[in-house]
Image: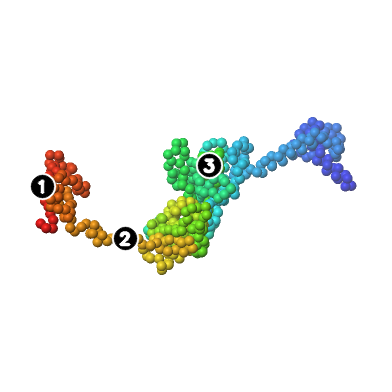
């Protein structure tokens, strides 16, 4: 048998059931072979045919098309069922919600938070992320997640301050911050309106709002970071969730970030300021000469400037004189007192001119540092004078000369004092003649009322008050009698 006959027979056996179905033949039983089916109609006429009479090119095309459609449907069903797992419910297409800000703001904007002097950033746990409203409702909610590395979890746990008498706190902290969604400059802390923060499904305490008297204005919270270390799971295998709820403000957006920071003290900042070095004294001398230089347009010329050595904050003599580079005045303040004040309540304003005085702009003044350690400065001197040539001197002490002789000489020793009563005095001179003195006694004498007396007499009733003394009841007292 040739190869062509073998291929023809095999193809005939495969296409025989399709031909039988298309021609209206009865269905094939499960235990009936194809060969038996092909020979069944010929057994009635006792004519046995060994092969089927169906030509391979005479297959019904309608059945082939239906077969291809069934195969395509099966393939489509198998593709839809590939993405579904027995552990997950089937996914249905949901109508797309209208996002308010998701299309106009990036997820991770290029927002720069203003640096906090008392905190050093060690790592960013959540990069600055936009609070994106997902619906058109007033209140919005958005979750955020972060993990700690094994080293970070160990560092936080081991940095807990457990000294007696000290508030139990962590030196290395997980810090949460909010700000406005602005990329033009560094942003200060700013909380969204009606913000509520939950860390691992626990309500996080936020700074108390500052009350306001303006009607219709929501009180704002102080611009401070939030320490969430106490509510963070210190485990590298468990994720931490932060849920932020806020009232959408369609006029402006907000961003948040979470960072691992190390807390510093005012003593640490003083050491860093001293390591940076003091500004040279020649710079201050040049500034003094510039301020005291003669101005042709001004008729009044200033020749001396007086500067206090007392700190305007503590009213004590300065130990570390400093001032911001952005200020134009020569008056300094004590750096340690200024940093301690901002450690408790950060304002970062100059105590002299009330302008912003950031930590990065503070410098120690070398000129006033030399003045404070100079042996020419008396210990009780708290003020100096600045000259036109840049030198300094102590102000002259004002001598108050009290001359007892002058006060005694003002009253002549030969004066005669006549005492009328306890509260009336008449002074007369001895140079007058006796006749004139007697005439003066007869004349009505002027009364001098001493206002330094107590008011006890005024409180007495009118009936009990003593009448004024008579001029005749005088008693002359002089040196001769």
In space, the residues marked 2 and 3 are separated at their CA atoms by: 75 Å
* N-term mark: 2 or 3: 3
Residue that mark 3 sits on: 141
Q: Where residue 371 sits in the image (x, y, percent)? A: 44, 64
Quadrant of the frame with the C terminus: bottom left
Q: Which mark is residue 39?
A: none
Closer to the camera in the image, 389 or 353: 389
Label 2 SS: loop
Q: Where residue 328 sits in the image (x, y, percent)? A: 50, 55
Q: Residue furthest bottom?
A: 375
Residue that mark 1 sits on: 473
Task: Check the image and report above or below for 398 versus 193.
Answer: below
Residue that mark 2 sits on: 400
Query: Is 349 placed left or right of 414 in the picture?
Result: right
Closer to the camera in the image, 336 or 43: 336
Closer to the camera in the image, 268 or 139: 268
């Amino acid at each position: 048998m040739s190869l062509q006959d073998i291929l023809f027979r095999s193809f005939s056996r495969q296409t025989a059931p399709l031909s039988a179905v298309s021609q209206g033949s009865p269905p094939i039983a499960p235990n009936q072979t194809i060969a038996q089916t092909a020979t069944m109609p010929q057994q009635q006429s006792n004519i046995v045919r060994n092969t089927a009479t169906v030509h391979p090119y005479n297959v019904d095309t309608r059945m082939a098309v239906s077969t291809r459609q069934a195969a395509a449907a099966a393939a489509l069903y198998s593709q839809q069922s590939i993405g579904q797992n027995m552990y997950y419910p089937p996914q249905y297409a949901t109508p797309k919600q209208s996002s308010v800000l998701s299309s106009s703001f990036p997820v991770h904007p290029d927002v720069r938070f203003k640096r906090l002097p008392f905190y050093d950033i060690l790592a960013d746990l959540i990069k600055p992320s936009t609070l994106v409203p997902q619906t058109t409702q007033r209140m919005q909610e958005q979750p955020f997640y972060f993990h700690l590395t094994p080293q970070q979890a160990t560092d936080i746990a081991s940095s807990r301050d457990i000294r007696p008498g000290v508030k139990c706190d962590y030196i290395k902290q997980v810090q949460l911050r909010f700000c406005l969604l602005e990329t033009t400059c560094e942003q200060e802390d700013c909380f969204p309106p009606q913000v509520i923060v939950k860390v691992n499904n626990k309500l996080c305490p936020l700074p108390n709002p500052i009350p306001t008297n303006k009607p219709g204005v929501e009180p704002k919270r102080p611009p401070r970071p939030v320490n969430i270390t106490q509510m963070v799971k210190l485990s590298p295998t468990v994720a931490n969730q932060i849920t932020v709820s806020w009232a959408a403000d369609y006029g402006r957006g907000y961003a948040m970030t979470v960072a691992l920071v190390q807390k510093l003290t005012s003593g640490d900042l003083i050491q860093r300021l001293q390591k940076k070095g003091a500004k040279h004294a020649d710079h201050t001398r040049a500034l003094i000469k510039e301020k005291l230089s003669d101005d042709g347009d001004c008729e009044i010329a200033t020749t001396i400037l007086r500067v206090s050595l007392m700190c305007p904050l503590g009213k004590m003599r300065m130990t570390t004189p400093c001032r911001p580079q952005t200020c134009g005045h020569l008056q300094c303040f004590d750096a340690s007192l200024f940093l301690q004040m901002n450690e408790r309540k950060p304002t970062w304003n100059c105590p002299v001119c009330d302008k912003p005085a950031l930590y990065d702009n503070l410098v120690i003044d070398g000129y006033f540092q030399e003045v404070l350690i100079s042996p020419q400065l008396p210990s009780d001197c708290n003020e100096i004078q600045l000259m036109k040539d840049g030198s300094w001197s102590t102000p002259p002490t004002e001598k108050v000369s009290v001359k007892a002789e002058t006060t005694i000489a003002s009253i002549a020793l030969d004066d005669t004092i006549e005492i009328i009563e306890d509260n009336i005095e008449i002074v007369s001179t001895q140079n007058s003649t006796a006749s004139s003195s007697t005439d003066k006694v007869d004349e009505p004498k002027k009364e001098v009322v001493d206002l330094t007396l107590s008011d006890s007499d005024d409180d007495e009733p009118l009936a009990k008050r003593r009448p004024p003394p008579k001029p005749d009841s005088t008693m002359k007292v002089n040196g001769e009698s």
